[in-house]
Image: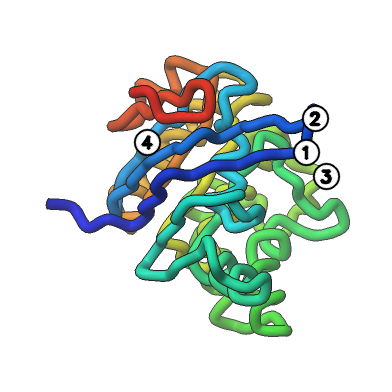
């Protein structure tokens, strides 16, 4: 049996109070095993983005349990969540959010520089290796503003992997890419999943992207429905 990496149970998230109260997650339960590559599917408003935000420790649930790597994250302090996130979780968004005044390499090593308070030779070597694996050996020192959309998203994937996270959360990572660039990004995600055992949870509305994942998780009305 695969080792459980993430385990959430009876997860509720409510926004607002009284007449303005909106229940986004309604007793959701989900487990992710180490090494999974899963697609998160569901219509707009189903709770996917809220779930990703909670799994990424950027938001606390209203109630319920959220465990990862044996840590009770639903009851952790803000500082502990920040430290945990920096060590164990990577993010890839639809909009790559690269720093415009930084090179591709500087963008990739930024998470490690923040954690350690400086750039190190080891971080630069790791960043270069990731960019080479992303097919960007000739773009390592290019400013991010000089990169194409597909190249920027590959830099964003490399940045998410910089600290060797156990879990990478991707929110519509190919939403702004043409089909060829989207397939290239997914090829690289699949390679990292196989080679490094990184767990990926990819939120998408694209059936072709979802079909490339080994598991499809359907969310509806704040619960996992399939």
Dot 4 falls on a residue whose secondary structure is: strand
Label 4, label 1: how many angstroms apart (C-alpha)?
A: 34 Å
Q: Between 194 and 171, which is closer to the camera in this rendering?
A: 171
Q: Which residue is mark 2?
A: 20
Whether residue 168 sits left or right of residue 7 in the image: it is right
If you read the primary sequence from the N terminus, does the residue marked by circle 3 or circle 2 appear first? 2
Q: Nearer the viewer, mark 1 or mark 3?
A: 1
Q: Work out whether mark 4 precedes mark 1 in sequence or the reverse, and give the earlier one.
A: 1
Residue at image location 68% in from the left, 25% down from the top? 176
Q: Which residue in the protein does label 3 denote? A: 145
- How far is the residue under mark 2 from the one under mark 4? 34 Å
* Nearer-N-terminus badge (4/3): 4
Provide residue 149's location: percent of width, then percent of height.
70, 33
* Residue extending furthest toward the left: 1
Q: Quadrant of the C terminus?
A: top left
Q: Which mark is residue 188?
A: none
Q: Are marks 2 and 1 in contact (CB under 8 Å)?
A: yes
Q: Earlier in the sequence, mark 2 or mark 4?
A: 2
Q: Do the residues bearing badges 4 and 1 touch, measured as CB atoms within 8 Å? A: no
Q: Residue at x 41, y 35 (%)?
A: 187
Quarter location, residue 25: top right
| Mark 2, secondary structure of its residue | helix
Q: CA distance from mark 4 to mark 3?
A: 31 Å
x, y (%) of residue 91?
A: 59, 50
Label 3, label 2: how far apart the Cα atoms are: 42 Å
Give percent across and percent down for residue 124: 60, 73
Residue 2 lies left or right of residue 210; in this view the side is left
- Choose mark 3 or mark 2, whichever is in front: 2
């Amino acid at each position: 049996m695969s080792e459980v990496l993430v385990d959430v149970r009876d997860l509720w998230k409510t926004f607002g109070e009284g007449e303005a109260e909106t229940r986004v997650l309604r007793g959701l339960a989900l487990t992710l095993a180490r090494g999974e590559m899963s697609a998160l599917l569901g219509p707009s408003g189903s709770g996917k983005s809220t779930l990703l935000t909670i799994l990424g420790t950027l938001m606390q649930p209203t109630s319920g349990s959220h465990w990862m790597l044996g840590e009770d994250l639903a009851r952790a302090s803000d500082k502990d969540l920040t430290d945990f996130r920096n060590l164990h979780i990577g993010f890839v968004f639809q909009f790559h959010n690269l720093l415009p005044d930084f090179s591709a390499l500087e963008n990739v090593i930024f998470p490690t520089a923040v954690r350690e308070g400086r750039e190190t030779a080891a971080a630069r070597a790791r960043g270069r290796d990731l960019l080479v694996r992303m097919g960007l050996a000739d773009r390592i020192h290019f400013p991010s503003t000089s990169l194409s959309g597909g190249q920027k998203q590959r830099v964003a994937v490399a940045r998410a992997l910089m600290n060797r996270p156990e879990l990478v959360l991707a929110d519509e990572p190919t939403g702004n890419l043409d089909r060829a660039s989207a397939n290239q990004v997914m090829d690289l995600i699949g390679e990292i999943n196989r080679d490094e055992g990184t767990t990926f949870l990819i939120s998408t509305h694209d059936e072709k992207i979802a079909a490339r994942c080994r598991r499809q998780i359907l969310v509806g009305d704040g619960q996992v429905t399939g």
